[in-house]
Image: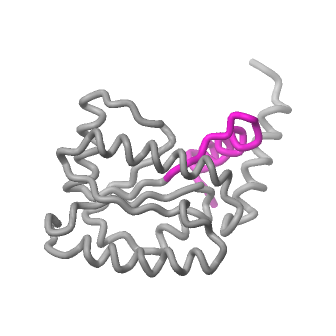
Amino acid sequence: MSTDVESRSMGEATDIKSGNGWEPRIIAFLCNWCSYAGADLAGVSRTQYPPNVRVVRVPCSGRVNPLYIIKSLQHGADGVLVSGCHPGDCHYISGNQYARRRFTLLKGLLETMGIEPGRVNFSWVSAAEGEKFSRVVAEVVQTVKGLGPARRLVKPSVFEHSQGQSAERSERPAT
């Protein structure tokens, strides 16, 4: 059972995907200490970057379970970005090294499953790199936009549920 917020966001995603103005939905898992702070700096500095990213703040990139990435793709995300501290700068000593190893294996697995290489991205962004965060997000959005909407791993119920909501919206009288 999905919540009203999930239902509404999935309905909006389908509306966007069905039209000519399709925009990718990117889920970004950002390390609290570096990448999230870099995103915050980009916002405070009013640095422009695409609004396609939905941020999930995590304590460390090493704490991102690969299942989170797979579940994001299953639930309709067109791409995933995992971003952490630069190597050697992890606040948890070696969390980002675990993440790098884990996601190298995951990318190989996803490619074997037929997921395009550009759908899942990994980057290093420090707290002082707001401009770099903006560039990384723009590059990820452009890459995923070039790949088109995600079709693999996406649960059919996600699209059926959201298409039903789109039909309901069009049938309701305007108020």
Quick check: 105 above or below 58? below
Q: Residue at x 72, y 49 (%)?
A: 162
Quadrant holding the C terminus: top right
Residue 89, image x and y in percent? 14, 64
Q: Residue at x 62, y 41 (%)?
A: 23
Residue 72, image x and y in percent? 54, 62
Quick check: 75 above or below 138? below
Quadrant holding the N terminus: bottom right
Quick check: 18 above or below 109? above
Residue 97, image x and y in percent? 26, 75
Quick check: 67 above or below 80? below
Q: Residue furthest right?
A: 171
Query: Magenta segment: does it hold 158?
Result: no
Q: Is residue 2 left or right of residue 172?
A: left
Q: Residue furthest top?
A: 175
User: Quarter-wise, where is residue 77 in the image?
Assistant: bottom right
Q: 151 or 170: nearer the eye?
A: 151
Q: Is residue 33 left or right of residue 103?
A: left
Q: Which residues are magenta?
A: 1-26
User: Quarter-wise, where is residue 5 in the image?
Assistant: top right
Q: 175 or 131: nearer the eye?
A: 131
